[in-house]
Image: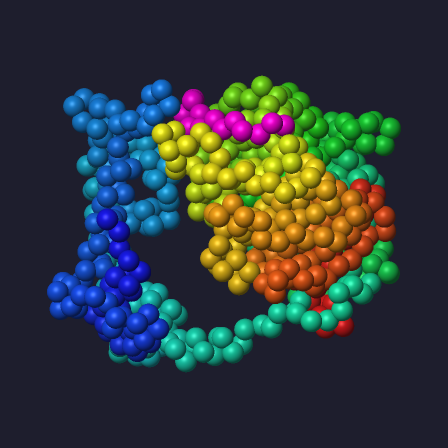
Amino acid sequence: MSLSSDEVNFLVYRYLLEAGFTHAAFVFGCESHVSKVHFKGKDVPVGALVTFIQKGFQYMEIEANLNEASAAGTLVVVAREGTDVYGEYTPLRARDILTKDLEELRLTIKEMQERGLGGPAAAAALEAEAAAEAAAAEGAAPAPAGGGEGEEGGEGGGGAAGGGGMGGGGPAAMEEEEQEAEPDFLAGGPVELPPAALRQLDGHSEDVYAVCWCPTANLLASTSGDSTARIWDLEDVAATGAGPPAAAANGGGGVRVRVCKHAGLRSGEGGGKTGDVTSLDWAPDGQVLATGAFDGVVRLWNRDGSLRSVMEGHTSPLFCLKYNRKGDLLLSGGVDKAVIVWDLKTGGERQRFNHHSQPVLDVAWRNNSMFATSSQDRTIVVCRVGDARPSKVWQAHSDEINSIQWGPGGRLLASCSDDGTIKVWHYAADRAHGGDKPLHTLKGHSKEVYTVRWGVPESEAAGGRALLASGSFDHTVKIWDAEAGACLQTLQQHQANIYSISWSPSGNYLATGSFDGQVCIWAMHTGGTLARSFKGAGGGIYDLGWNSEGDLLAACFQNKQLLVAELRRAAAA
């Protein structure tokens, strides 16, 4: 059984009419051609869409309460004390069902029950919360007609008399907002970025390995073989374009910098690789920077560069470090073959996983409680926090797996390997339907594939497709339709190995960096044309990263160099 798009459109149209959004209903009805549905509207009961959504919520709540176990690789429901429910049936908040997937909901229920909030206690808590919200709503002053939030419950409420719209602007405000939309500053103009648009950040004394932008501010973090991470403050640069360009850069490129010195690490100078700070990641709230180093220690730093905490557990160099979306767990892996989940509330190990026989090369969260790891042992292991056994073990690559990344929604996982292939895995497929085999094996590169990155499905470039980009030692970048398993395009401009690729936040541009020292920015929404390019002063490129607004692009180099391309400044030049 399935609903057609016409049937869904009709339900939405009816809901808009019933809620009093007559103007929106008229526009939506015209655009979706609801008059062409093959059933009588009067046969559909009032409130049908809301009823279906409520029943869907109830189904999700029931499914999350079921107790699951893995027996011989098959998912089965296990009865406990005469019931198939895990402990006492625990109601969930609508907000949880809206924002979490099934695995996260199950983990939420377990945590609630461990805190004594399962069963009747959860129901009582939900009733108390609903009563508090109702009391707050009654005590709130009504919004003025035609402005502010809608009359019925905050954003998106309002009906016909309330002026409607999110934030109360209505259609006029939406049109005004569209008119004020900023033009694409990468459209048109010369391909080669002028020197005035390149800011050189001086300070590192060894190779710069990785960069990562703070998600909430224009703070750029970088790691190096000089035993330091650095946090560069580019807030003023992004806002005004002020400060000296690369040609006149001195003292850190004219920006404030905080140096995070890793005690116990020796600088790469005269000390081999023992000074390497190998990996980094910002917490989702942008307040804490995590770094991993050659000594196997995870360090947490405040935005001002002060050391917040040290977490020891690995015995060898770290290769990868990732926060989950919630920011309460941190994942690390490296040469000692172990994967550790760190609990950031306690500052200690939450759980240790030892499922690989060779060093761990990459880690990737699927959601807040599930993750995948890849290794030199040619396997991908999918685990759930709290479970000792893996949820999935995928084996199909014939050489070490360099990079993995979950696609939007966590349904598909992409992996790339020294065997020259990319594989796309479908998490939900069970073993009977080929769940232990890749959905697609993407072939086309002639040498090792070092990195893969998913595009943005909502972007103009993707048009709803699952776009996947791959960078290879054959000097090319390929763009794939991951669902169809087809290569859409090959980008050829580089003359050496490609180590880094990065989609812009809009998903319309793709930046690529190579050991030829060149950065290319491709306009994927206009057919993959070369929009911008720039070169450093020699040395290969290890990593690239866009800031959250897509107007600054950082590139770090093999020759101690760190450049930031000020794309908005280039457009104004």
| Residue 142 seen from this side | no
Residue nearer the viewer, 391 or 58: 391
- Please name the colour scheme applied to the rendered image: rainbow
The residue positioned 69% from the left and 39% from the top of the image is 446
The residue positioned 34% from the left and 40% from the top of the image is 102
State left or right for residue 431 relative to residue 159.
right
- Does residue 392 show up magenta in the picture? yes
Coordinates of residue 489 in the picture (x, y in percent): 62, 53
State left or right for residue 361 relative to residue 151.
right
The quarter holding residue 511 reads bottom right
Image height of 169 relative to 69, above or below: below
Q: Main secondary structure of the magenta part?
A: loop
Residue nearer the viewer, 327 or 393: 393
Residue nearer the viewer, 45 or 346: 45
Coordinates of residue 222 in the picture (x, y in percent): 71, 44
Q: Which residues are magenta?
A: 385-399
